[in-house]
Amino acid sequence: MKRSKDIILYGLACIMIIFIVSGVCLFQPKKILSVQMANNYEELKLLIEFSDGSEEWVDIWQDETETYYFFLPAGADTGKVTFGNLKDEDSILLNNYNLRKDENVVTVLSDMEMGQILELQMQTNEKMQEPVEVCFLISQNIASIFIDTASGTVENIHSDKNIKEKGALRIIDSGGKNSYSGVIEYIKTRGNSTWELEKKPYRIKLEKEASLLDMPSAKQWILLANAIDDTLIKNEIVFRYAEKYTSIPSIRGQYIDLYLNNMYVGNYYLCEKVEVGKNRLNIFDLEKATESANNDRVYDKAVPYISEDGKIKATAGLTNPVDISGGFLVEYISDREYKVAENAFMTNGNRHFAVISPSKGTVEQIEYICGLFNEMETAMEQEDGINPITGKHFSEYMDIDSWASKYVMEEVFHDPDAAIASMFFYKDCDGKDPLIYCGPMWDYDRALGSYGLNNYIVDDAKKAGGYGIYVDLMMKHKEVSSLVYKKFKEEMVPYVNYKAKSDIYELSLKLDASAEMDDIRWPGVHGYYKERIASTEYLSCFLEEKVRYLEDVWLGKDDYCTVDFLDYYGNIYASYKVKYGERLQETPIISSYEAIFAGWYIRGEDIPYISGLPVLSDVTYESRWIGMDILIQNGLGASETELYQVDPEILENMADMLRKTQEQAESNRGDN
């Protein structure tokens, strides 16, 4: 009987081993051993056999001029590159070189200038097809990532950023060696305004934690497209500065060439995700603690909660861990984002924050962190910086050093998003550290003076005061402003004078080959200067001009007045520092989807902005607006007309008429 039982147990063990082994094999990254044989140019593929024996396929790509391109990863020239999906009897004529299926293309290309347009003629079924133009480009200095999705396409994930798809990921380093190979739990698109662009950003989650390109192990990673940054290097410049000169947690990243299902999709920045974790933002993980305090059934049944005043958005029905004082990771967001957020809070000062971690914050947790921010803001508002109820100074809530460092960077690197998005704060549990800190750093593709989405915009370096959060409240306290000026003088000025230009040049040189491929793959991404090199040089010029200006404003002896302009929601839209007695050289251009701009007026008064007058004091101008409903009813005489029923062309014509009327009124005021 015992022997029979042993045999049964042995058999079950064998079955389990087979199942486990089979499971491992099932979820191993797929490796394409064969592909469809090419019958035309569109089906041609290159098979790259790298020096370490690993293999990858690369698809052909055709641009709008009908020129074909092959974009090769760095390290391909040290191995063997062949037209791997040619039939044995077919051949390729490349500038009079006859190539068969197994012949090395690199050998032929070594006799030519890489990147030149060549003539390619394909022979199939003993018939020569019409010749076409082809260009071979090869990257240098950076690794390549190859991702195969389960469906074999990216159409699904591109249609909706909430759609996730399983896949396999491989990394080939710049020398052509396999650096990583593994299963990804999912790949998805990400981003807000950048998601609307053709060159999509992505988020990937590995099946198991792993170190990618020498970065600390983690599961979740981001692939930034840098689609509106024609230099490709703005994020890296800011991240480098934060890591070297400040204590603010910085994002680590590496540039790569990305291939999705064998198709080259451009130069990307593989980087860490802003999240709580031992190798990321290393604070107490309140999310894990909350999960541990609730079983899966309870956790899944938890329901959304919104307070009566709408200031707390949390999760009801969960048990709290013993300590709910941290850790928190929160992001400053717009009121529009707040309306759709599920895990967020609004302070008494009408500032909106999303709680990133814990992602299912309990009512008590969100109330706690909201209360802390309220107490801190109240302290900031006081002349002496002390909360009259708690008796605590704002420095007992906020780490002033991190705020000052962050503000200097936002101001000098000139980030237009700083006052509206991607502004993070974190707080550990009280037992480790009771203070709120600024960081991590994130999202600087629109910084450094120029950015473009629908059109390209170049900002004036001679602006100061509106790049950040709590600026007005904090800079009125001498201990804070003195620290800001000290950090600017001792850290930022030497960096711009002696280090920034070399960093910019080094990164530009490193990415030169990859950026050339990216420019061809995404021809619509062009800066003001049209050429990437000129746009890159502009970064140095902008930083130098910005620092010279701030040296005058912050460290000089001249008296300056602050001129603020408020947007539709009453937030600072633009801020200028003007020498006492001088004239403001420009007024900001502003628009809104909800109304038509009707002019700038001194806040709380019916006194319009008049160009040409000397600035003799600090002044704030609010924007006045005409609602779309009023415009439609009066302009069309149709009180029952809904906005969606109006011909957009008619509405635009009406808006143009209104703008011209405003411009004429401004001109008349100036003449008077």
Image (tube, grey):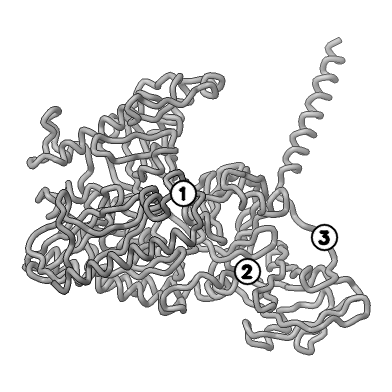
Q: Residues within 10 Å of mark 2 (few under 14, many from 20)?
A: many
Q: Element at badge 2?
A: loop
> Residue 176, image x and y in percent?
63, 67
Q: Element at badge 3?
A: loop
Q: Give the Cα separation between the discs numbered 2 and 3.
A: 20 Å
The residue singled out by tag 3 in the image is 34
> Which labelled disc corresponds to residue 73?
2
Q: Residues within 10 Å of mark 1 (few under 14, many from 20)?
A: few
> Residue 477, image x and y in percent?
11, 48
381 shown above or below 592:
above
Q: Nearer the viewer, residue 620 or 467?
A: 620
The residue singled out by tag 1 in the image is 643
Sequence-first tag of 1 and 3: 3
Q: Residue at x 39, y 39 (%)?
A: 338
Q: Residues within 10 Å of mark 3 (few under 14, many from 20)?
A: few
Q: Amino acid at mark 1?
A: Leu
Foreground tag (1 vs 3): 1
Sequence-first tag of 2 and 3: 3
Foreground tag (2 vs 1): 1
Q: Amino acid at mark 3?
A: Ser
**Number of callouts in the render?**
3
Q: Element at badge 1?
A: helix
Q: Residue at x 52, y 19 (%)?
A: 298
Dividing the picture into quadrants, the one containing residue 14 is top right
